[in-house]
Each structure stands twice: as structure tokens, then as C-alpha cells.
Image (cartoon, rainbow, N blue to C red):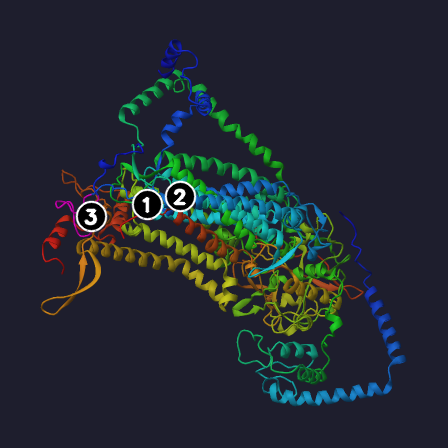
Amino acid sequence: MSSASSTTSGATKPASTRANPANKWEAAADWTDGRLGIYSLAKANLRKIFPDHWSFMLGEICLYTFIIIILTGVYLTLFFKPSMGEVIYNGSYVPLKGISMSEAYASTLDISFEVRGGLLIRQIHHWAALVFVAAMLVHMMRVFFTGAFRKPREVNWVFGFLLLVLGMFDGFFGYSLPDDLLSGTGIRFMEGAILAVPVIGTYIQMFLYGGEFPGHDIIPRFFTIHVLLIPGIMLGLLVAHLILVFYHKHTQWAGPGKTEKNVVGMPLMPVYMAKAGGFFFLVFGLIAVISAIASINPIWAYGPYRPDQVSTDAQPDWYMGFSEGLIRVMPGWEISLWGHTLNLGVFVPLMIFPLVLVAIAVYPFIEGWITGDKREHHILDRPRNAPVRTALGAAWISLYLVLLIGGGNDLFATHLHLSLNDITYFVRIGFFVVPVITFIVTKRWCLGLQRRDKEKVLHGRETGVIKRLPHGEFVEVHAQLPQKDLYKLTAHEQVQPVQLPAQTDENGVAGKAGIFTRTRAKLSRGFYGEGSQIPKPTAEEHHEITSGHGHH
Amino acid sequence: MSHDMSEEKLPESHGAAGEVADHVDPFADPGLPAHEPRRTDIDERAAKRAERQVSLMFVLSMLATVGFIASYVAIDPDKIVYIFPLGHVSALNFALGLTLGVALFLIGAGAVHWARTLMSDVEMPAERHPIEADDEVRADVIQQFKTGAAESGFGRRKMIRNTLIGSMALVPLSGVVLLRDLGPLPEKKLKETGWKEATPAKPVQLINMSTNTPMTAADIAVGSLTFAMPEGLHVHDEDFQQRIAKDALMLVRIAPDDIKDDKSREKGFDGILAYSKICTHVGCPISLYEQQTHHALCPCHQSTFDLSDGARVIFGPAGHPLPQLKITTDEKGFLVATGDFQEPVGPSYWERAR
Amino acid sequence: MKKLSARRRHPLAALVVLLLALAATGGLYAAFAPADKAQADVAAQSLAIDEGKKLFAVGCSSCHGLNGQGSSAGPSLVGVGSASVDFQVGTGRMPAQQPGAQVPSKQNIYSQAEIDQLAAFVASLGPGPVTPTKEQYTSTNPDDISKGGELFRTNCAQCHNFAGQGGALTKGKYAPSLEGADAKHIYEAMQTGPQNMPSFPDTTMPEEQKKQIVAFVRHTNSDEPNPGGLTLGSLGPVTEGLFGWIFGLGTLIAVAIWVAAHTTKAKKS
């Protein structure tokens, strides 16, 4: 249809349809529009509204560190030689003179000591990578605790999750590349982990390493994965993630004038072009300063990798720390039967590792199923108003932290003067106990905050003014909240638990709800039942108190 | 939607604290508050000052870039300077990082300050539209799809459909097959080590990793720790890394009475025990040997082995003891091995038989 | 790349060199040593032993026995040599204050002369590693640093960490940090294997190599600059992660708060 109309218009109008443009810039824009259709695109986006809140900028930190990593990474590839061929070092770093090492390690030393500014770029690359994954995790926490993952954003949540996992692994491959003593130990760990996979483990190991560990292929192969395969996929996901953010429009906090049907904020041009564009430079600048003052991954101090050498404090970068914790605290179980060995001591952590991550990925779908809510949500929840969700998130974080302690047990032992073994026992128990305790405490905390909100709405805020009543009692004067605050504190809706269908149908025949229906009803009660939320104040309650005796 | 959303359309600023505008529903949405001006909106001098501040940041950024280039040209990469509290650091790295950081940061700070003080900060609403298409569009699309599907005959011509599915399912196999030459098959590679060259008739000497010389039993003192590799292996060999990853030994000497495991004592020579240095958990070189407790700890995951008790696992995630190499001495008195380990060294794997 | 190591010598070469050296020094000593000075040395030595015995009776005998034979509270010192005494007392580990997983180093309470006397007494109980001379542990060859580095990574880094920062052992024990450690004490620790540290006797790690290791440790701990900036304790990725979270992401979030915050309104104050 549209093609038909354009041909008719083409027939009636000359080829260049537009009147003379006002200046050469407009002319250039017209030229581009005639080929790329930029006006329609800009009409929707140039004055697109974004709400203002610092936590909405966490995603931008991720985006900008990713760009910094790509820029510096490209520079590093100009000098790095991903080869395991042996060379004798003869550069300017004295403590390694005359030592044999791989070309990968030697070229990393050269980047650090011979290439001017090479050390800075290496440090920016690595610091940005650490901050990148940290920012992704915090960004995801923000989205989780505010319920921003609800319809229509579940798919974008999954994209973000994939970016987090890919970012972690790309980091792992990246720090393996210099072939230093620490990263080589990581690659050795990877070999052991692969070998623990039943049936196909040895085959995967031989194919990945091109033979027995360490072989001569693993660094070049990791290089391709690190600079091409994973960043390529990530770039695609990132673009999709951003398109969806634009398409869905940003979520916003409840507040006067803000509804599910609008988004309140300032326009992309000019405010957000300046703020977001400026923020990129702020992020880049800060990471450059950090790289000027703090050293990261001093590979020269570790020495070149040799499978018979090792240094204590053998740890991965922080984002792999929780998997390191899983590996360290697992008891050494091994099953040997019929000439085969199942190394549970490695295999069990290897299976729990993805589960810990997948738990985040599937959460929106689980919550969506429990609530049965099919509406779109654009107003964010305050974490206290979704106590079970908040408590689950906090429990996950506590599990993650317990595992991080397990992953750094040797450093905790030396720096806190504790026994390594005791820390490991603590983590073994804490793995099961700490998340449960965290869940209970967080949920109660949220309920307490809900009660306080209710109190504030009904009785107003404490003014600090003490008044003496005629009969001698001292009371603090409470001032009623302005309406915008009343609205803010009561804007959230409270979900009611789903009800089981009637036990008997209209004919009096006992109907049986399926196991899924019953589980769902049970979970729903757990999420939104009486013990899980404080009923919010009603207008009647408010009237009663405000029209009556003022304050208690 | 437009920028000049007229001010009068916005609700009046609501009353002071304590006054509820709507007495029917105290929790009603009072609507967007009216815009309140900033100093720079009403005071031209303040606006001018902000303008100067922004420009100053941009100018300083330019200077920092000049400083970056000057540092790059002027500072020797080997130059070390003392900077409190960082210590002795590379002058070039510090100068480049600081100038680059300042140059970038000031561009960002200038832009944000500009946005915050001089660009309009009127908050405005934009409407959202439901993501879901309305029923009419939905029906239309489904109809179009059905038409297209019918025209293709995909459902009707089952032979085409099935063969297409078959060919599509098979073609990725080519890609899988191509991966075959990534590496060799495992075969028996993991079962053997370089010590397999040793036979009772032609024993292989244990070479001290530090001195590159063979050792006599008298060289190994009780309480000492020595690392060894098989004779004939050299650091510059093409396959050194691969071989040392399995062949590395740790030699300890324990007073024979303190050795609890008889089999282990027999494999040793006069209290000298030769264990694989490669952890049975995931293969780190385990060598944190405590000579009084005879415990060896792995620095990677803290598996602990009792070397006086056949390297039994006493703590941590390792699943089985460290393999022990049987050693003796040759006619010259040097420590030698007369055969390979009796079990595979390093981490467990599926095909490993106990 | 593949070439025979030039360092590899005939196994008996060391022995031959040693014998030659012994013969040469013995001959030279016999030729030049003044007889009366030798006698004076012997006298001084026995005096030191007597003084050492007195100090030992006061400070050490409650655990190690009057004659260093040991007791349930402390091991026998017969044959531990003067190097052990010099290390244990010189680093303040002995006399120990209290039992525990490990005896820590602390402020040393004896003068070097007293330590020498104690060492002379303990050395007289039975032959053992001898306190090294300054020449033995002081390297003058710059190549020793890199050679020592490689030896350090093979023999020491697994417990003491790549930069000599120390690390955890089982059940509350630890390998101490080598930061600020005396060159002589590092050398003696390798000779004698104090507490749970294994020894690296001259038979498996010749003097020359110990000297190289000492050179590397000294270089890493004192002379070595940190080109990249703060070392964050040279503890690897754990402290880097902590720094990245607090100073990296922390500062960025602080900046984000500034970027997103509403500018102050020109309100009636």
C-alpha cells in the first residue's frame, strides 16, 4: 500500500521534492534523509524523554566501560603476540632477563615496559573490565530490586543476563592471554575442570588444548575467542538491549504526575546528549586516573607460566571469585566404579556454578507465573513494597558473598589471623544457612519499613517539636505529609495472592487442582499473603485520624 | 510532548505541608509539580558565571591534552619517580594517565555542568503506548501469514517440507566434523608420564630442578624439600611445558618410623619419598610442604595431603591421594626411578581406573 | 629453540671442584695462618661457649633442657647448628612467648654478641648448619636477580607468594611475609628450615643459589619500583577486585549521583 502511494506521489512531484533548504546543513540533512530516512527516526527520538535518577545511569557505566575496553583492546592487539613459542627475554625488566618464556608473555612485558603508554592502556583495559562486570552486576541488582524486569522487559532482562555471563567469560579469557604464572594456573584449573566432565571430558580437553596441557594452541585460541567471538556476540546483544530500552521507554519511580501511561523527564536533545555524552568522558577520565595511580595485574611480578611453578594467592579476577569459592569448599568426593571415575569434587561445583547464574535469568518468568500478572509495568517498585522479592535478591547476594569469602579463604586466613580450615568449614555451612537467615531478616526489615510508611501516611512526620498537653503529657507534634508524599507512599498496588479454584464444581463433584496450580497458589500466598505485606493505609483510615483528634 | 508545554496547563504548586488538596481521596495524584527556576534561569550573572566555568573546564582539558603529548615525547619510559603515597612508580605511566584522565574528565564535567545549569530543566511527560498491537492489526497479520503459508504450500507439500527439514538438520554436521582436527584423541595419553622410559634394566635418574644435577640419597636431608624431573628433560625442549606438567616430582625425606603407610615406605628409599607435584584435584603444582606435620597444601584450592601417610587427602576438594613414584638408587648411588607411576597423575577424568 | 642446556655439568664436576678448593684453601691456610692466632681463636671460642651456656640456662633451658636435649615443651637442639639459633633468636621468634599454631617473629631481646654466644653453645652440642658470612648472602652479580627469581618461583613462591608477601598454611599456620626480612635470616631459613618450613640444604640447593634467591627477594622487596602505581599489597586479584569495587565503581556511582541530581532551585530561602 505504501509503495503504491509513493509511486503516485513520485508521479505527480519532481524527483527532488523539497523546496530550497535554508542552508547547507539542512541541505545535507535532506540529502541523508532522502537515502536513510533520518527525519522519521529523529522525530521519534530527538526529544525522547528520560527520567532523572542516579540508579538509571548504572547501565551507562556498563556501556561506557565496554566502549573503553574495545578501544583499548584494539590498541593492545597491535602489540600483543598470541603465541606460545619460546623466547629468551632480553628487555628492560631486570628480574626476568635471560628467562625463557612464551612470546605472549614477552610481548605483554614489552607492552608494559617498551611501548610508551602501553602500560597505561593495559591498566585502563583491565580496570575497565573489572568495573564493567561490577557495574553490570549492580545494574542488574537495580533492575531486580525495583521490579523493572516485569512485562514488557523480561526479554531485555535475559539479554542483560547474557551480557553479564559473556562479560565474565571474556574477562577470564582475557586475563589468561599474557601466559603469566597466575593466569596459567587459571588455564590449568580449566583443564582439570573440563577433565571432570563425565564421558566427554577428556575429548573436550584434547580438542580445546590441541593435545595435552598446556600444548601450544590454547593462547592463540583464547585470543580469537577473547577479541572476536565473544565481543562480537556481546556487541549484537548490546545493540539489541539498547534498542529495547528506547522502544520500551525508561521506567520511572512513582511520584506526582507520573503514571503507567507516561514517562516524565528531560529530553534527549539537549539535556541527555550532554549528560550521557559527558558521563562517558567522566567514566573514561576516572578510569584513566585510576590506571595512573593503581597497578593491576602486574604480570612482570608473577613471572612466566610453568606448570611446575605456582604462587600462593592463586585467585581469579573477582567476578569468577564465587565459582572459585564453590570449588574450594566442596568436599573431595570421588566415585570410582567399573573402571570409570566421577570427580564430584570438581563436577558438582561445575554444575552449581551455572545454576547460581541461571537463577537470576529465570526469576522474572517465575514471578510472572506466580502473580499471573499480564499487564505492563513502568512504575518501579520500592524494594520494601515487594518484601519476598527483595528478600530473595538479598539471599542471592549473601550466597554470592559467602562464596567470595570461600574463594579468598587463604587471604582471609592470613589477614584476619584465622585458620584456613575453619573458614572453609564456615563457608560449607554458610552456603546453606546464610541465605536463609538473610531472607528472613530482609523480609522482616521490609515489613518494618512498610509499617513505618503507613505510620507516616496516617500520622504525619515527626517535627521534633514537643508539646505539653493540658494533663501534663508530653507529645511530639506530627505534621501531615504534603499530598505529593502521601501519593508517593501509597501509589504502589498490593498484589493479592491467587486463589485456588473452588474445591468442588457446581455439581458438587470434587475437582482436583493440579500440582502446578497448587504450588502456584502456595507460592503466591508466600509472596503476597498476610505475612508478606502490610496492608497499605486506606483513605478511610486517613480521614478518621486527620478529622478526629489530630494526633494520638 | 513539545518543549513549550504551557506552564498554565500544569497544576498549581500544591499547598504547604499538611494541607491536602483533595479531601475526597487524600492519596490522589496531585499531578506534575510546577517548574521551579534555578538561579541561572533568573539571574543572568549566575548564568554568565556558569558559562565561564564550563568554558574553563574545556580549556583546562585542552591543556591536559597538551600535557599528555608533552609527557609522551619528553619522559623516558624507564624513568621512575617517587610519588606519595604511591611509592616508586613509572613517571611516564603516571603522567600519561593523569593528563589523559584529567583531559577526559573535564570534557565530561564541563558538558554535565552545562546541562545542569544552562540547559532547560523543565520536566515534561511523554506518553507511552502499549507494546502490544491492537486486535485489528493482530488479526490482519495472522491472516497475511496464513495467506503466505498457504501460497508456499509448505503444509500441503509434505515431501518438500520433510526433505527441507532433513537437509537443514544435516548441514550443520559439516561444521561439527570440521572441528575434529582441533586436537588428538585422548587414547592413553593421560595415563602415562615421562617416567615411563624408566625400566629396572635402564633406570632414569631424578634430576634436581634447581641445580640440574642428579642426587644421592645422602643429599636429601630429613625435613628438606626438593623438586625433581626425569633425566633427559631440558627447560628449552619444545615439549618441556607439556612434560613437566606431568613429570614434576616433590621429594621429601621423613624418618622411616614416622611413615605410617607401609606401601608408601616401600616405594621410597630410606625414607625419601617421591610424590607427584601435580594436585589430583585440578592439577596445580602442590608444594606447600609443612615439614613438621608432613602435610602438603595446595595453594589453589587448599587440598591437604599427609605425605607421611601415602599422601592421603586429609582436607579439601581433592578426591584421591597424590601418586607416588617408586624410587631406588643406581650403582653410583644416585636416586633413580625404575618405572612409571602406577596410576595416572593429575586430576581425575572419566576413563581413569582406580 | 631446542638446545642442550649449557649449564648441565658432569655429576662429579662439583665434587672435583670442591676437593680442589678444599685442598687449595687448606694448603694456603697452613702456609699463611699464624699459629698463635689460631690458638687465640680457640680460646675465644671456648669463652663464647661458656657465656652462651649461661645465657642458654637463663633464657632457653626451661623448654629445651639445660643441655639442649629438649623436653615436652621444646625440641632437642642437638645438631641444629648456629644458623638456627641466629635465625630463631635474631628474628625474635625465640624465646617463644606462648604456645600456638606457630611462633611469630617479634622484637628481638638479645644483642648480636649474645646471639653469637648462644649460637656457639648450641653449635657445640653437635654439628649443624653454620651462620653464613656476609659474602655468602650478599650478591654482587646483577644476573643473580633473574636467576634467583626463577629459583624463587620453583621453590618459594608457592608459600611466600610471588612478591614474598607470605600466605596461609593449614590450621592457622602461615608462611610469613619476607618484606623487610634480613638477608642473613632469609639465607638461614633456607639452610635450617625453621618450624614448618622445609629446609633447602646445600646438598640440594648450593650456596650460590641461596645467594641468588636472597638477591631476588631483596630486589623485589626494597629496590623494585612499582611501575603501574599502588601495588595493593601484591596479593593478586582479590585486592584488585576490592579496589575496583570501592574506588572504581564507587567513584563512578558518586559521579552518577551528581550527573543525575536535580540542580538546586532558586527558592525563597
Main SS of the magenta part reads: loop
Give the residue furthest to the front: B45
Magenta span of residues:
B13-28
SS class, disc 2: helix
Packing grade of label 1 (10 A; few <14, some 14-19, many >=20) is many
Measure the C-alpha gap from mark 2 to mark 1: 13 Å
Residue A546 picture location, percent across and down: 13, 54
- Residue assigned mark 2: B48
Q: Which mark is drawn over residue A483? A: 3
- Residue assigned mark 1: B38
On whether disc 3 and disc 2 are found on a single subunit, the reply is no
Instruction: Read off the chain for label 2.
Output: B
Image quadrant in which you'd find residue A2: top left
- Between residue A417 and residue B153, name the one nearer to us: A417
B139 vs B111, left or right, is left
Residue A47 picture location, percent across and down: 36, 33
- Between residue A192 and residue A261, name the one nearer to us: A261
- Between residue A25 and residue C176, name the one nearer to us: A25
Instruction: Read off the chain for label 3.
Output: A
Measure the C-alpha gap from mark 3 to mark 2: 37 Å
Residue B83 visible in the shown view: yes
In reply to whether residue B21 is colored magenta, the answer given is yes
Residue A373 picture location, percent across and down: 27, 40
Q: What residue type is labelled 2?
A: Lys
Residue A504 picture location, percent across and down: 17, 42
Q: What residue type is labelled 3?
A: Gln
Instruction: Read off the chain for label 1.
Output: B
